[in-house]
Image (cartoon, grey):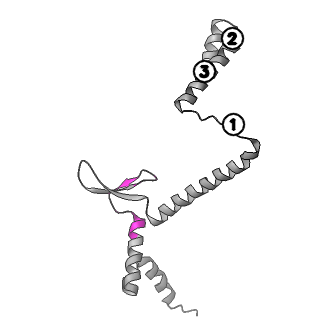
Amino acid sequence: RKLEAIEDANDEVDIEALEREKANLELLALEEGDLLGTNPQPEDLPRQRYVYQREKFNLRASKKRRKLTGENWVEKIDGKTKYPFWYNEDTGEAIWEKPKVLMEIEADKIAMEKMWSAIPKKPLVLVMSFLVPFPER
């Protein structure tokens, strides 16, 4: 925009002035911490790429683990109604009912403690489907 305004004012552009302004803005950003300035050596780049990819993989794996184990859900109290609600720290989702993943984990834990007398409905239906007689057998 600035460049267009300058070109409209007079058809000549002072490239050196623009470069100085750009350099000043870059230095200001470096001083304020908005811009990180590094000068990596070419031989360090493969190692840095490996570290970056490893950390990215670890973050994805931990996010997936939290999703499967329900660790990303936290019970909080609503400030207005004082009722408890569930908040997902990874996605920002908030719900009033207990999350499905936590209910399934709780049901599996009870089933392991009480064995067959407390098996969750889904695996029970699956097991029972194998017990249905088939006339073609």
Which residue matches tag 2? Answer: 14
Amino acid, disc 3: Asn
Q: x, y (%) of residue 103?
A: 38, 69
Q: Residue at x 40, y 86 (%)?
A: 116
The image's mark for residue 39 is 1
Q: x, y (%) of residue 85?
A: 31, 56
Foreground label between 1 and 2: 1
Residue farthest to the left, as pictured: 81
For the residues labelled 3 and 2, the Cα–Cα distance comes to 16 Å
N-term-proximal mark, 3 vs 1: 3
Q: Nearer the viewer, residue 72 or 107?
A: 72
For residue 136, what is the image quadrant?
bottom right
For the residues labelled 3 and 1, the Cα–Cα distance comes to 19 Å
Q: Quadrant of the C terminus?
A: bottom right
Numbered range of the magenta stretch: 88-103
The image's mark for residue 25 is none
Q: Quadrant of the N terminus?
A: top right
Say which element carries label 2: loop
Which residue matches tag 3? Answer: 24
